[in-house]
Image (tube, rainbow, N blue to C red):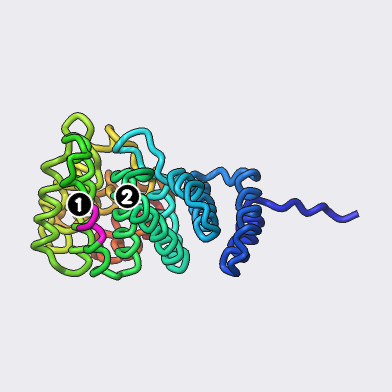
C-alpha cells in the first residue's frame, strides 16, 4: 500500500484562499479553521489566517466575529513587542511576495470600514493606528511612496487624541517617525528623512532602547556619504541589542554595514571583527549582502577572504 497523504495547515489554507476569492465564504471559513487546527507554528502565519477569517466573516455580515479575528493579529503585551501583523508583513517582504502584501493591504481596509461603522464602540484608536502604520509600511515595500507617506501621517495624526498616555504616545511616535523616514529616504527626500529620524531618536528611552531608529539613521547617512555618523548610528543600534533582541537579519545587517563602512575609512581590523560577528550569526551573510560586499575594493576583499578562508 502507498503512503497515506496527510493534509497540512498549508493545504487547508490554500483551499480556503481559493474559496475566499470565489466568494464561497462559508467554505473558506471551514478551511481556515482546519488550517488553524493543524498548527501552522509560526506566529505570522496564524496572523494571516486570522485576517482571512476576519474578511470572510465581514463579507457574510458577521461584524463582531470579524472584529475579533482582526484583533488576533494585533495582540501584544506592550508597546515595544512586535505585532504578529508586523512579523507577517516583514515575512512577506523578505519573500518578495508583493501579491500577498497587496491582498493583505486590501483585507486590512475592511477593518477601517468596521471602525467607520462602529467608531470607538468596539474598536480602539490604538488598533486603527496600528493598521494605518502597517498599511504605510506595505505601501513602502511595494514602492507606492505617496500612499505610504499618507498612511504614516494618518497614524501620527491619531496620536493627537487624548486617548494615549504620554509614554505610550512617545513610543508610537518614535516608531512611526522612523518608519516614515524610510519612505522619505526611498523617495530621495533626505531633509525630511533626517528631520523625522532625528526626532525619532530624541524619543528613544535610555532604559529601554529600540535599535530601529538608529539602523534607519545609519542607512540615511550612509546614502549621503557621511560615514562617521553612519558608523556611530550603527554602533548605537548594536548597543541597543542588549535591550531588545533583534531579528537575525537586522543583527547581521548592522554588523555587515558597520564593517563595510569601517573598511571604507581604512579601519580594517575593526571591519574584520564586525564581519566575524556577522559570519558567526549567518554563514551566508556575504552572499545575502552581496551588493554591499561588492562595493569593497578588491585588495581589501582579498584580506577578508584570506582571514575567513572563503571567497568573498
Residue 282 screen position, x and y as percent: 41, 48
Residue 123 sits in which quadrant? Answer: top left
Inter-mark Cα distance, 1 to 2 = 18 Å
What's the residue at 14%, 52% (across, down)?
A: 197
Q: Is residue 261 or residue 307 the one in the foreground?
A: 261
Q: Residue at x 78, y 54 (%)?
A: 5
In-image side of 306 versus 51 (left or right):
left
Question: In the picture, residue 208 is in which quadrant?
Answer: top left
Instruction: Give the label, 1 or 2, closer to the camera.
Output: 2
Count neighbours of disc 1 (C-alpha within 10 A) and say few if under 14, some if 14 to 19, many if 20 or more.
some
Number of marks drawn: 2
In this view of the protein, which residue sits in the foreground, 245 or 290?
245
Q: Is residue 266 visible?
A: yes
Q: Which mark, residue 156?
A: 1
The image position of residue 239, as x and y in percent, is 22, 37
Asked whether 155 falls inside the magenta stretch, the response is yes
| Position of residue 296 measured from the top left corner of the image (x, y, whole percent) | 25, 62
Q: Is any atom of residue 298 visible in this view?
A: no
Identify the residue under disc 2. 119
Amino acid at each position: 500500500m502507498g503512503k497515506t497523504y496527510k493534509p497540512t495547515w498549508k493545504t487547508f489554507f490554500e483551499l480556503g484562499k481559493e474559496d475566499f476569492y470565489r466568494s464561497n465564504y462559508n467554505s473558506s471559513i471551514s478551511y481556515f479553521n482546519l488550517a488553524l487546527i493543524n498548527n501552522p507554528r509560526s506566529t505570522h502565519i496564524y496572523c494571516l489566517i486570522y485576517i482571512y477569517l476576519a474578511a470572510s466573516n465581514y463579507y457574510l455580515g458577521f461584524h463582531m466575529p470579524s472584529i475579533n479575528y482582526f484583533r488576533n493579529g494585533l495582540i501584544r503585551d506592550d508597546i515595544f513587542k512586535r505585532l504578529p501583523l508586523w512579523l507577517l508583513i516583514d515575512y512577506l517582504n523578505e519573500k518578495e511576495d508583493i501579491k500577498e502584501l497587496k491582498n493583505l493591504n486590501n483585507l486590512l481596509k475592511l477593518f477601517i470600514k468596521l471602525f467607520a461603522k462602529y467608531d470607538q464602540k468596539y474598536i480602539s484608536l490604538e488598533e486603527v493606528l496600528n493598521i494605518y502604520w502597517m498599511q504605510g509600511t506595505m505601501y513602502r515595500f511595494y514602492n507606492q511612496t505617496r500612499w505610504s507617506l499618507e498612511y504614516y501621517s494618518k497614524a501620527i495624526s491619531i496620536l493627537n487624541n487624548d486617548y494615549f498616555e504620554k509614554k505610550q504616545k512617545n513610543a508610537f511616535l518614535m516608531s512611526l517617525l522612523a518608519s516614515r523616514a524610510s519612505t522619505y529616504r526611498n523617495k530621495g527626500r533626505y531633509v525630511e528623512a533626517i528631520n523625522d529620524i532625528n526626532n525619532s531618536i530624541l524619543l528613544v528611552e535610555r532604559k529601554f532602547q529600540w535599535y530601529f531608529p538608529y539602523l534607519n539613521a545609519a542607512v540615511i547617512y550612509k546614502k549621503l556619504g557621511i560615514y562617521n555618523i553612519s558608523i556611530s548610528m550603527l554602533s548605537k543600534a548594536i548597543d541597543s541589542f542588549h535591550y531588545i533582541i533583534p531579528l537575525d537579519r537586522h543583527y547581521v545587517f548592522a554588523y555587515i554595514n558597520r564593517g563595510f563602512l569601517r573598511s571604507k575609512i581604512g579601519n580594517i581590523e575593526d571591519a574584520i571583527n564586525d564581519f566575524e560577528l556577522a559570519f558567526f550569526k549567518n554563514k551566508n551573510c556575504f552572499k545575502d549582502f552581496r551588493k554591499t560586499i561588492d562595493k569593497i575594493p578588491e585588495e581589501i576583499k582579498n584580506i577578508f577572504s584570506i582571514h575567513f578562508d572563503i571567497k568573498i
